[in-house]
Image (cartoon, helix red, strand yellow):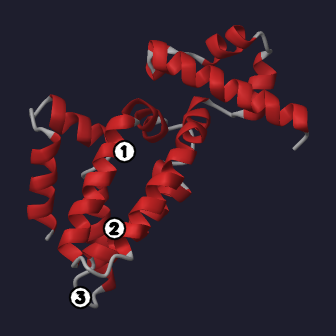
């Protein structure tokens, strides 16, 4: 990618992050981003095909850091699977809390590829599969990991907190009880 294209992309990301922080992800349109930057919509869409792609890019670096930390937990031989699951779940819930609006955008857009088809989901699946698999039944272990991750989708997570009144600690406790 040309240097000016890279700089343009970075300007878009920086502007979007500032607007999202100030006004909320749901309240900012692609049109607003292009007007704030003084660029045409074509330039914006040449860099990001939609708002979901932009949101995904904004959390991509943070996903990388999360995965690095999660792999360190997996490699810790002093912890058993249950202890690892607890730490991994805690890390992921902290991440979800910090990125809930961006994740809602990424997970919620039906026009694009599902979040479950993104590399970040595959990485999460592989990490949690490692601590949730309990026997040689591949189908069962896959199902169990899918159900675990589905219980942590942003919509379900927000529903449990906002509608059911659970705290992060309760949610973590209940998930650990359910998936041990």
Callout 3–callout 1 Cβ contact below 8 Å: no
Vertical placement of 145 versus 111: above or below?
below
Identify which residue is drawn at 43% across, 38% down.
103
Q: Along the horizontal axis of the image, is 110 left or right of 39?
A: left
Q: Secondary structure at mark 1?
A: helix
Q: Along the horizontal axis of the image, is 98 left or right of 45?
A: left
Q: Please rate how many residues cluster around mark 2, counting C-alpha atoms within 10 Å: few if below 14, some from 14 to 19, many from 20.
A: many
Picture disc at residue 135 = 3
Q: How far apart, in angstroms, are the residues tagged by discs 2 and 3?
A: 14 Å
Mark 2 or 3: the one toward you: 2
Q: Please rate how many residues cluster around mark 3, counting C-alpha atoms within 10 Å: few if below 14, some from 14 to 19, many from 20.
A: few
Vertical placement of 109 versus 140: above or below?
above
First of labels 2, 3 by sequence position: 2
Q: How many labels sit on residues?
A: 3
Residue tagged 1: 95
Q: Secondary structure at mark 3?
A: loop
Picture disc at residue 128 = 2
């Amino acid at each position: 990618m040309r240097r000016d294209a890279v700089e343009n992309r970075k300007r878009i990301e920086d502007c979007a992050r500032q607007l999202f922080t100030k006004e909320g992800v749901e309240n900012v349109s692609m049109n607003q981003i292009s007007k704030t930057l003084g660029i045409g919509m074509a330039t914006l869409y040449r860099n990001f095909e939609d708002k979901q792609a932009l949101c995904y890019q904004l959390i991509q670096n943070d996903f990388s850091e999360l995965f690095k930390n999660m792999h360190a937990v997996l490699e810790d031989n002093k912890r058993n699977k249950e202890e690892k699951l607890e730490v991994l779940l805690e890390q992921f819930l902290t991440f979800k809390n910090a990125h809930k609006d961006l994740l809602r955008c990424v997970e919620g857009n039906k026009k694009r590829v599902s979040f479950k088809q993104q590399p970040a989901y595959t990485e999460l699946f592989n990490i949690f599969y490692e601590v949730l698999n309990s026997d040689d039944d591949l189908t069962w272990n896959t199902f169990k990991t899918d159900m675990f991750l589905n219980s942590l989708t942003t919509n379900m997570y927000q529903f449990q907190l906002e509608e059911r009144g659970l705290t992060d600690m309760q949610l973590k406790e209940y998930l650990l009880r359910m998936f041990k």
